[in-house]
Structure formats: C-alpha cells, structure tokens
Amino acid sequence: MIENWDFEKPVVELEKKIEELRKFSAEKQVDLSAEINNLEKKLKNLKKGIYSNLSPWQKIQIARHPKRPTTLDYINLIMKDFVLLCGDRLFGEDKAIITGLATLNDKRIVVIGHQKGKDTRENIARSFGCANPEGYRKAIRLMHLGERFGLPIVCLIDTPGAYPGVGAEERGQALAIAENIRDMFSIKSPIVVVVIGEGGSGGALGIGIGDKVLIMEYAYYSVISPEGCAAILWKDAAQKKEAAKVLKLTAPDLLSLGIIDEIVQEPEGGAHRNYELAANSLKESILKNLKELSSMDTDAILKLRYEKFRKMGVFKEPHSA
C-alpha cells in the first residue's frame, strides 16, 4: 500500500471512491459509468490543481517517498544483463552504492547508483543510501573499469548525504569524495548523471560529475538538507519549509541556474505512482543524452565537462551608488 502525504489525501480519497464504485458496479451489475466518468474528470482536475502548485517542501516530500523507485528498481525495469560488481579492493563492500555492468538498449554501460532500502531492516543495512568511503572508492574503481573498456557511465543519485559516522571519517570520507570529484573530470568515457530522488551535498557529488546532469521532476539537489539549513540559519529545524524555499533546490530552479541540463518528467504525482512510466521516461532521457555524447570526441567531452562545472556559481553583484 502506498503511503501518502497530507496534500495528497483528497486525491487518495477520490481514487478510493472511484474504485469502490467500479467494484460495486461489477458485483451488482449496475451501470454507474456516468457517475464514474464524472468522478474521473473531477480527479483529473484535482490532480492538476495539486501537483502543478506544489511548494518546494512538498516536492522534497515526494522525493523522499518511501515507495519511490530506487536504483535497483530502474535497473530491473530498463536494463538487462545486469552484473553486480562489489568491493573497493581496500576495505569492503558498501551496500549504500550499487555498481555493475548492464545493457541499456543493446548498449553496454557501467551503472552506479545510491541504493536505499524498501523497509527498515534493508534501510539499516544500506545506511539509508548514505555511502561510506568504500562506496565512493568502489564507484570510482568501476568508472576506471568503464574507461578502460570504452563503456559509457550512468550514475543515479539518491542520497540525503554521505554517511556521517566516526568510522567513515576514520577511513577518509572527505578524501574519498574529493578524489572522486577530481578523477571524474578526467574519466575518458561519457558520463550521464541523474538525480532520481534526494541529491544531498557531497554525498551526491561523490558520483555527480558528468557531461550531462539530469534530474527527475520531483527530485531535489542541494548543498544541504532543508532541516540542516534551518538549524544553521534560524537555529530552528522547524523552519525547514522556509529553508526549502530559499535553497532553490527543485528541478525548475536548478535548470534556471544552470546546475542541471534537463528535467526528466515523472508520472502525475511522482514516480512512486507508476514505476513503468517513470522508468521509460528515464530510459528515454539517458539514451538521448548518451547518443549526443557518442558523436563527440574524447577531448571535446573532457573540455566541455570541465567548462560546465567551472561556470557554476558565477553571479553578478549590483554596482554601488
């Protein structure tokens, strides 16, 4: 059963009513098609009114939805011949990052992505998608493998941030992320990055340097969580809704600022409402961008990748009187 947020309750209640009428109509052999059609029109207008006017905080809630598709869901839906590759060859295996080889429309690729759990037990095992240093070192190991064999790389971001534990710091969390950022600028394979859910801070950037950076419609990408920002600026985590507004972390904001290149459309209400539609939309966007990159030579790709990130953060101050 899909969990729903407060702003979705009117939609859920109407959907439930329509389903009950359909069931009653079938069981009692009563023609209720006119009533059902009227309710479906009402539902369509209701959805349009709600989902076209979501606040940044409501979009974050959708990005964090417990039933939202994960990296493994997308791998299973749009890729085939997936071979899971594990370990960083230094410390161990980090289940918060999935890495492997897969086939996308007959194109062999390296796929890397944060992986959250489907329930509490799995979330604990996967650190809620918060990777340790060994996860980032595993990721860059796979990128170099892809480079060696001329395979394009697809990175799927979905993390609230890197794992903040003492052990992660002792094993070089900051260094692992910094080395990944540095090395990804020189990987000689095309890299397409997609933020599929949460894109939190350095935890996202550790696999986030790409030639094309895409974002799902209801995903977010930010230097800090709204709760963390509110705690720092207002000394009050309850100001998270205001923080979400000022951080400019939604897909349209990021596109206007030049942080991302493209918004991947989701089913109405979010990817958790229709996995297949969301997956097909993601597949189409990835293939389109990989095709564009495949027509470019390596030097041009590396040059544009560098220039893309150098342009970020540029702003103009008004002249003083």
Image (tube, helix red, strand yellow):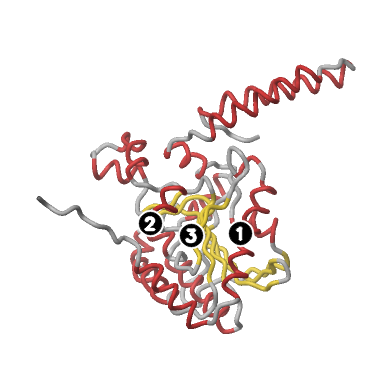
Picture residue at 34% right of the left edge, 60% below the top: 166
Classed neighbour count for the residue bearing mark 3: other residues with Cα under 10 Å, few (<14), some (14–19), many (≥20): some
Where is mark 3, residue-wise?
261
Q: Is residue 60 left or right of residue 71?
A: left
Q: CA distance from mark 3 to mark 2?
A: 18 Å
* Secondary structure beneath label 2: helix
Q: CA distance from mark 3 to mark 1?
A: 11 Å
Where residue 211 appears, x then y in whole percent? 49, 69
Where is mark 1, residue-wise?
285
Where residue 125 appears, x then y in whole percent? 53, 54
Which quarter shows the N terminus? Answer: top right
Q: Which labelled disc corresponds to residue 265?
A: none
Where residue 197 appears, x then y in whole percent? 51, 50
* Secondary structure beneath label 3: loop
Q: Is residue 50 left or right of residue 26?
A: left
Q: Nearer the viewer, residue 172 or 176?
A: 176
Picture residue at 59% right of the left edge, 30% below the top: 47
Where is mark 2, residue-wise?
201
Question: In this view, which residue lies farthest toward the left?
Answer: 321
Residue type, numbered disc 3: Asp
